[in-house]
Image (cartoon, rainbow, N blue to C red):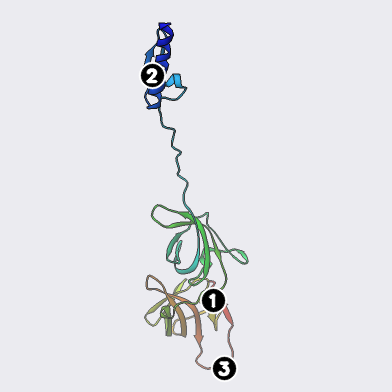
């Protein structure tokens, strides 16, 4: 009878210790050793494993392109970087990154990086080009003093040319010559440079004939 009481008492003590998150080794009158945790069928009060995160933050946003410095651009105040896996699309399908222009409305899907930039997975052109702020529009008139593969200098002003630049009075940038008179409509970029939206060749005599309009393929 005393043995039975001792066994019941040990079980009660084991239950109390288990409820407090402790593990105790008890010896019964029958010579068997038991721990409080084993008697309760638990894990000795151990904490369950914490699931680890690590998934990168996926982002998606829309806005106008404010500046372009390939292979990066700024969209709605956010810095967007691209790599060889970035897809660029418009209504016609895949296009080159260089075909994007300041003022275009785009949708960006990508992954936020540790430095706050967004690594673009896809950039889609949406709708019409947003009008540029008046303060950023610049007109330059004068004689061409230098011509490069992607720029020209009018007087002392350097003007950049990209695939979106429109030409009037000539077809290709290489058709121009130093000493010719041009009128340039440009946008001032964040770094202070001028990116031409349109370049028009001014003829010495208005004979009513034009060589035609062209886009900035050079």
- The answer to whether residue 104 is left or right of residue 50 is right
Splitting the image into 4 quarters, where does residue 148 fall? bottom left
In this view, the mark in front (2 or 3): 2
Residue at (40% x, 52% y) in the render: 114
Whole-number angstrom distance, CA of label 2 to CA of label 3: 111 Å
Q: Using the image, tell me which numbered label, if any, was put on residue 207.
A: 3
Question: Can the viewer see residue 16?
Answer: yes
| Label 3 residue SS | loop
Identify the image quadrant of the N terminus: top left
Whole-number angstrom distance, CA of label 1 to CA of label 3: 21 Å
x and y percent of residue 141 in the render? 43, 86
x and y percent of residue 6 in the render? 40, 10
Is residue 56 positioned above or below 67 on the image? Answer: above
Sequence-first tag of 2 and 3: 2
Splitting the image into 4 quarters, where does residue 208 fall? bottom right
Q: Using the image, tell me which numbered label, if any, was put on residue 8.
A: none
Query: Which class describes the residues within 10 Å of circle 2: few (<14), some (14-19), or many (20+)?
Result: some
Circle 2 residue: 13
Query: Which class describes the residues within 10 Å of circle 1: few (<14), some (14-19), or many (20+)?
Result: some
Residue at (38% x, 14% y) in the render: 26
Query: Which class describes the residues within 10 Å of circle 3: few (<14), some (14-19), or many (20+)?
Result: few
x and y percent of residue 27 in the render? 38, 11
Q: Are marks 2 and 1 in contact (CB under 8 Å)?
A: no
Circle 1 residue: 172
């Amino acid at each position: 009878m005393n043995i039975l009481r001792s066994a019941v008492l040990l079980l009660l003590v084991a239950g109390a210790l288990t409820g407090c998150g402790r593990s105790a080794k008890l010896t019964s009158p029958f010579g068997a050793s038991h721990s409080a945790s084993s008697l309760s069928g638990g894990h000795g009060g151990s904490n369950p494993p914490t699931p680890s995160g690590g998934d990168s933050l996926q982002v998606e946003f829309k806005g106008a392109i404010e500046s372009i410095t390939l292979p990066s651009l700024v969209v709605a105040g956010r810095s967007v970087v691209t790599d060889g896996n970035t897809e660029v699309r418009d209504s016609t399908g895949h296009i080159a990154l260089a075909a994007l222009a300041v003022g275009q409305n785009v949708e960006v899907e990508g992954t936020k990086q540790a430095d706050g930039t967004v690594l673009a997975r896809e950039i889609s052109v949406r709708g019409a080009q947003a009008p540029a702020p008046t303060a950023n529009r610049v007109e330059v008139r004068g004689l061409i003093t230098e011509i490069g593969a992607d720029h020209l200098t009018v007087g002392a002003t350097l003007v950049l040319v990209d695939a979106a630049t429109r030409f009037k009075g000539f077809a290709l940038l290489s058709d121009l010559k130093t000493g010719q008179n041009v009128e340039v409509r440009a946008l001032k970029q964040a770094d202070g440079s001028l990116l031409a939206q349109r370049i028009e060749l001014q003829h010495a005599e208005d004979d009513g004939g034009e060589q035609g309009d062209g886009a900035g393929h050079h």
